[in-house]
Amino acid sequence: MGTGSLHLARADVHHGWDRDRPPLLTVASGAELTVETQDASGGQLGPGSTSASVAELDLERANPVNGPVFVTGARPGDVLQVEILAVEPGRHGWTALIPGFGLLADEFPDPWLHVWELDGGEAVFADGITVPLAPFCGVLGVAPAEAGTHSVLPPRRVGGNLDTRQLGPGSTLYLPIEVEGALFGVGDTHAAQGDGEVCGTAIEASMTVSLRLSVRRDLAIDTPEFDVTRPLERPTAAAAGYHATTGIGPDLMAATRQSVERMIAYLERRHRLSPEAAYALCSVAVDLRISEVVDAPNWVVSAFLPQDLFLAT
Amino acid sequence: MGTGSLHLARADVHHGWDRDRPPLLTVASGAELTVETQDASGGQLGPGSTSASVAELDLERANPVNGPVFVTGARPGDVLQVEILAVEPGRHGWTALIPGFGLLADEFPDPWLHVWELDGGEAVFADGITVPLAPFCGVLGVAPAEAGTHSVLPPRRVGGNLDTRQLGPGSTLYLPIEVEGALFGVGDTHAAQGDGEVCGTAIEASMTVSLRLSVRRDLAIDTPEFDVTRPLERPTAAAAGYHATTGIGPDLMAATRQSVERMIAYLERRHRLSPEAAYALCSVAVDLRISEVVDAPNWVVSAFLPQDLFLAT
């Protein structure tokens, strides 16, 4: 059922989910489309930008989402199947600490920026520290049923800003449809991210994305679900091993914060990173797992740092 | 510095961390020891047990911990390095739903039990469903500084019931020492568990464990940390892929519950499991990741089901 050259250009974006927004493209179920995404700053950050540029960000222009795409035949109660076929990064990316944003916003009040070169399959963070790339779409969603414009920042049961790093090539996402035509959108492409995206930004970059959209009426889901067909672990990470820190306590959020604080402390003492750089590295490369959530009253969250980041040292 | 045949027998256990409990063994830093652990029921559940046996559990006998082990030279402020050398399961294990215990205790009020045969590297759960084994120690800890007897159920900054499934052979755990001699203990051995241990029990089994304990004075940690030297992902899981469900919302615990509820629903409809069996399978084989914890006000928790469990179907 692929219909060939369906395309959303870089300018084909919106900044809010809205069931009444006119679609920019109408496709049949089974159609393949290519999308030129913008980075999460909408082009405001890139080569030549500095921490000062972060302070000057116009947040009205942030988080552009390509779409809406109207999928013929999609009805409320159906499921939209989104096959992620390819996600190809542009040549540059950025990671920022944005004041007021992120898991440890209270501990990191100042703007900070790192600009990445993405020429190969990895990107240099600092002398001897390299982050392997694993591009995916941070935003994949459809319009909520509730009338009005809904912020693109939070994810919802209809998807949106899921920032789930396994949603790269080879994965298939299933989204509950709430409005006629689904009104699909995609954006916020990331060249690499850890589970958690703790500082609030990943390696943010514009990309070329290929997707196949299909309506499913044989599935019953309440929240997004997805299938992953590629390995979750890099061979180099498996070979090099991991260092893990933990957060332990009766509140999952506090335990999560503690696990990241301890990883930042580890990166400061072991790899002589600044706290800001350590926090940013956690966001792009450290994975948060819930180790146990049953041994009342204390839960354990573990943060896993892959040691292959440091193979160059 | 290994000193040979240091050993804790199956009966060398306690049921509460206590700085004033007399040690059963004193070892030098660098010593290797072998430990015969009990299963978490202290032998109350095993072949021949039924759901009725779960209802009759004497919880006073649950969670036996081998120890205490006094490590010569260990002082408050030092770090105990625990190298996990080998963890060999016995021939049987069990997984139970224990009323009042577990992430979804309110939804699963009735006792339920599965007894596993552990003869090979995997264990059969049901027709066509097999769980690969990955044995580790659920409890690895030292005594808290605070006087009195402390429950063995919750983990703490000094470790204890961490139930962190990566603490198997090849891993090294670092624990903050709070009392003279550290007063190390080990137990609650699991033949397999998912990140989260959502129903509150894993594949619970007695085991033979080999460890090396060393005092470190060159480390600065506030909570347990660990190094992992073996791959986190099974080759069969990497090849077969995963199905993932999500929980999305402003409370991490509610999102965690939702991700597991959705996985139980998936296992019921896709693999025709009973809710109880699905919940237990999540506990032994499904991994919880924090996908994003920054897109206020909604966080995403993802539950990953490895598809290699079903290769036999």
Image (tube, coloured by chain):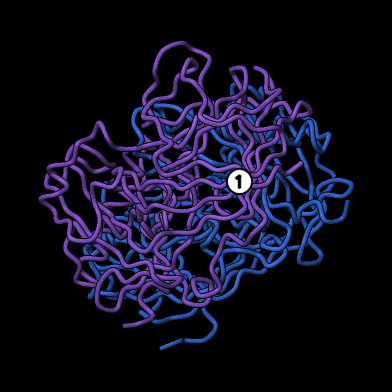
Chain colours: A blue, B purple
**Vertical comparison of A52 with B144: above or below:** below
**What residue is rendered at 51% in x and 38% in y?**
B140
Q: Left or right? Give the position of B219 relative to B99.
A: right
Q: Amino acid at mark 1?
A: Leu
Q: Quadrant of the C terminus of chain B?
A: bottom left
Within the image, what quadrant is residue A183 found in?
bottom left
Res. B285 image quadrant: bottom left
The count of marks equals: 1
Q: Which residue is mark 1?
A: B211
Where in the figure is residue A293, as x and y percent of width and height? 38, 39
The residue located at (46%, 10%) in the rendering is: B147
On the image, the x and y values in percent for residue A294 come to 34, 39
Q: Is residue A52 visible?
A: no
**Residue nearest the viewer, comparing A311 with A278:** A311
Residue at left offset 64%, top offset 49%? A42
The one nearer the camera, A162 or A230, is: A230
Give left or right: position of A304 versus B57.
Answer: right
